[in-house]
Image (cartoon, grey):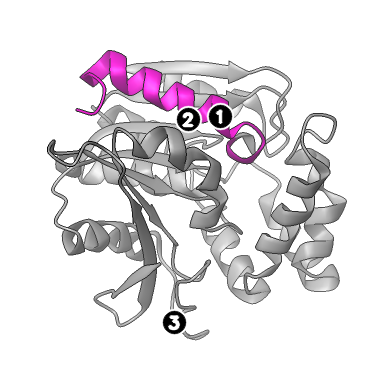
Amino acid sequence: MESFVASDGVRLGYCIDDFADPWKPAPILLLLHAAMGSSRRYYAWIPPLSRHYRVVRMDLRGHGSSEIPPADRELTLERLVADVIELMNHIGCARAHIVGNSAGGYLGQQLAMKHSERVRSLMLFGSTPGLKNSQAPSWIPQIRAKGLRAFLAETIAERLPLDEVDPGLVEWFLDEAAKNDPAYIGKFVLLMAGYDWQDELHRIGCPTLVVVPGAEPIGSTANYEPFRRNLRDVEMRVYEGAPHNVCDAFPGRCACDVLDFLTRRFGLGV
């Protein structure tokens, strides 16, 4: 992992994987992870993607290797978006293809709406236009009472298809999530649960891929319909029967869909 210091003094972690032909300029593909996650959760995506793109994985503030801000510091959506822009500036990236998983997709959407010049394309996995129309606020007292790992263990069937994934993945998923600070995670989730920007989606002008978990338990699959109604250039794919965390359960399928989308829209490695 590498790191840089954001404009408010918080140190943020990131890593770059680049196995593209060294004599060719490789476009940047920026991966933004879900709440309670980290950049490590994209590990299985890297082999297929990094052969064609310079893949940048960021740890959102308070997650993974990134510093947890002081408890008395206000957390805002604008600050989280600024973190992404400042990382792009730090690595000399004017524009990027952006993949966002769940909360990471919220940041990707905000970038595409408010900083469109920085986003070449947007690929969203399990990411609705905000978390307001969900049961997410009910998670917080459970996390406080049981702890992050125990809460996720009790609700793991809402996140991973237990009959289709290796049991080792389930344990690793829980162990990784448990590395995060419960108090900060509660603050982060409550922030995201305060937003619904479906009426602003028309501001996204870049080519967009939306992957919908077909058995979405966090809210409803109906919460993805605003993309279909309000985006000018959108492709939607449904992973039938899949719970929320498709990026972890089906990494190969997700990476293939990213490559397919980018190849058809831009040409491979462009």
State whether residue 236 is above or below residue 175.
above
- Closer to us: mark 2 or mark 3? 2
At label 2, the amino acid type is Ala
Q: Is residue 232 visible?
A: no
Q: Residue at x 32, y 57 (%)?
A: 81
Q: Is residue 70 visible?
A: yes
Q: Earlier in the sequence, mark 1 or mark 3?
A: 3
Say which quadrant the N terminus sits in. bottom left
Secondary structure at badge 2 equals helix
Secondary structure at badge 3 equals loop
User: Could you tell me how far apart the alpha carbons at marks 1 and 2 are, in whole angstroms?
Assistant: 5 Å
Q: Position of residue 252 (x, y in %)?
A: 56, 29
| Labels 2 and 3 touching (C-beta < 8 A) | no
At label 3, the amino acid type is Arg
Point out the stretch of residues depicted in magenta. Answer: 247-270
Q: Decide: few, some or many residues near mark 2? Use Cα within 10 Å; few <14, some 14-19, many ≥20.
A: some
Q: Is residue 13 left or right of residue 225?
A: left
| Labels 1 and 2 touching (C-beta < 8 A) | yes
Q: Which mark is residue 252?
A: 1
Q: Is residue 120 left or right of residue 74?
A: left
Instruction: Write down the residue under mark 3.
Output: 73
